[in-house]
Image: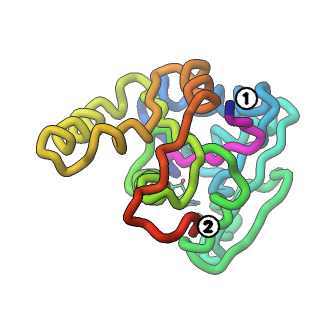
Amino acid sequence: MNTLKSIAVYCGSSDSNDTVIYEAAYQIGKNIHEIGARLVYGGSKLGLMGQVANGTLDHGGKAIGVIPDFLKTKEVVQTNLTELITVDTMGERKMKMHELSDGIISLPGGFGTMEELFEMLTWAQLGLHKKPIGLLNINGFYNDLLAMFDTMVEKQLLSKENLGILLVSDTVEELLQKMKDYKPLPVPKWMNRHQV
Ligand code: AMP
């Protein structure tokens, strides 16, 4: 059983026009606090990112933002965070969020969210980390992406086993349970290192 004391959330920096997604983002911030975890995220007050942080902070939870210096403007940064960590590059941010978390959840988002999710998935399939990675498929947002993953498996460009690294659910309760129960794959035999 994995302990989830610190959860990194990747999500859109824009406001979705889908109210179900928009409201779910706030709710997830609240859920993270309710299960006794802290939120680690990109530090922005914009879009779904701001919603998640408000959901945690409004209910007395802890939210840590990790933001690159060039994004740290008054228009972007969330002001009432438990802690704001400033880094130099996007790469450093990803590494810092990785260091501070023991599980990852991706909510709906755009390129930035995809980039963060995919890097964590590729690290996991190389055995570079053992953290559970959850995809919250709110209102079917990720149906097309999930279909694309099936095509990858069908064309033998992704193994079924590695597809299983990504934990998917349309409810936060089920997703968190899958993350707690997650058993990482063994490190590939051809690898000669175990950590990043
Ligand atoms: P996107 O899905 O393209 O909106 O990008 C959101 C993700 O990329 C978040 O998880 C952030 O870590 C990062 N990101 C993109 N834009 C911003 C921004 N304006 N402020 C803070 N982080 C951002």
Q: Distance between the residues labelled 2 and 1?
A: 25 Å
Q: Is residue 94 something one can see in this rendering?
A: yes
**Residue at 64 percent of width and 30 percent of height:** 180
The question of residue 5 being in magenta is answered with yes
Identify the residue position indicated by label 2 in the image: 95
- Amino acid on which the number 1 mark rests in the picture: Lys
* 166 on left or right of 128: left
Residue that lies at the very extreme toward the left in this rendered image: 155
User: Eyeballing the image, is 77 above or below 38?
Assistant: below
Where residue 14 appears, x then y in whole percent?
49, 48
User: Eyeballing the image, is 78 above or below 88?
Assistant: above
**Which sits earlier in the primary sequence, circle 2 or circle 1?**
1
Identify the residue position indicated by label 1 in the image: 30
Secondary structure at badge 2 equals helix
Of residues 67 and 149, the one nearer the viewer is 149
Where residue 81 appears, x then y in whole percent?
81, 52
- The magenta-colored residue range is 2-11
